[in-house]
């Protein structure tokens, strides 16, 4: 073995390299930052229920707080209603970067409008806002806990799907697997490009840098893999692997 080959092997060991047995589909949940000596990277599309983790936590937390503290029921009710409405909005409307900026500006304008109404004393609008505040939505402790548990059950059920429906990005091809049936689709690496897209800023925030991977070949979109959490953390490893040319030796 030449000195150059020895240096390559030592570098691979230091970076945690190794054979394909090191690659696992568990990576669809939490990607590794390792960028060198990657033979495959696993990604998967998650169901939309993953965006409901704020609602799930809020319902469970409100149930516990209502049972154990003296926080006004109306306050907890408004928190639960607003968080759940936010979750519904995430799946109803996609906010690209331009729409997200408009949304932020609209929230700022509403806040300024509420401040001006309070300062200037516009009675009609002030009474309307006060009427909304006086609604005081309330839920029983049991309702909070039941709704929270239902969302938790659906959430963890949704987390199981990527273990059976995932993509394996390799040097020579991109393969879609549906277990237990095996390979469902294969796209040759030659002539293909992989691009990251962020179709919704709210989804990007809720999945901590998530987005979609679009596989294009010969000017045609062959596959779109949406709702991938932590996609920003994965991209460096994906780009590094796809920039390399895989050479298989006779010994392999």
Image: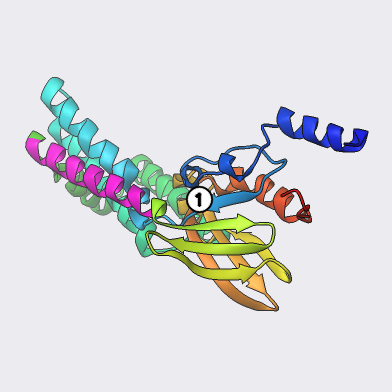
Name the residue: 82% across, 36% down. 8
Q: Is residue 236 left or right of residue 21?
A: right
Q: Nearer the viewer, residue 65 or 117?
A: 65
Which quadrant would residue 212 be assigned to in this image?
Answer: bottom right
Q: Is residue 68 left or right of residue 220?
A: left
Which quadrant would residue 88 be assigned to in this image?
Answer: bottom left
Examine the residues drawn in magenta and state their main secondary structure. helix
**Residue picked out by circle 1:** 204
Which quadrant would residue 169 be assigned to in this image?
Answer: bottom right
For label 1, the SS is helix
Q: Is residue 22 left or right of residue 147?
A: right
Q: Is residue 143 magenta?
A: yes
| Residue range of the region highlighted in magenta in the rendering | 142-161
- The answer to whether residue 216 of the structure is visible from this angle is yes
Q: Can you give x and y, in whole percent of width and height, for residue 5 in the image?
A: 86, 38
Q: Residues within 10 Å of mark 1 (few under 14, many from 20)?
A: many
Q: Is residue 186 magenta?
A: no
């Amino acid at each position: 073995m030449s000195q150059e080959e020895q240096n390559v092997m030592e570098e691979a060991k230091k970076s945690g390299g190794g054979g394909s047995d090191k690659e696992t589909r568990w990576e669809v949940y939490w990607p590794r930052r390792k960028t060198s000596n990657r033979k495959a990277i696993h990604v998967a599309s998650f169901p939309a229920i993953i965006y409901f983790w704020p609602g799930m936590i809020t319902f469970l937390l409100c149930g516990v707080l209502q049972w154990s503290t003296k926080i006004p029921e109306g306050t907890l009710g408004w928190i639960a209603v607003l968080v759940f409405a936010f979750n519904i909005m995430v799946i109803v409307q996609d906010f690209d970067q331009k729409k997200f900026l408009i949304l932020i500006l609209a929230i700022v304008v509403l806040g300024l409008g509420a401040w001006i109404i309070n300062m200037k004393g516009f009675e009609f609008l002030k009474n309307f806002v006060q009427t909304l505040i006086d609604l005081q939505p309330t839920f029983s402790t049991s309702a909070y806990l039941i709704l929270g548990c239902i969302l938790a059950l659906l959430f963890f059920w949704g987390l199981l799907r990527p273990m059976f429906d995932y993509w394996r990005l390799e040097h020579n091809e991109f393969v879609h697997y549906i277990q237990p049936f095996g390979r469902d689709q294969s796209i040759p690496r030659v002539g293909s490009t992989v691009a990251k897209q962020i179709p919704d800023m709210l989804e990007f925030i809720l999945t901590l840098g998530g987005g979609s991977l679009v596989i294009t070949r010969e000017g045609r979109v062959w596959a779109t893999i949406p709702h991938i959490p932590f996609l920003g953390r994965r991209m460096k490893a994906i780009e590094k692997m796809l920039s390399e040319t895989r050479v298989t030796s006779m010994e392999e």
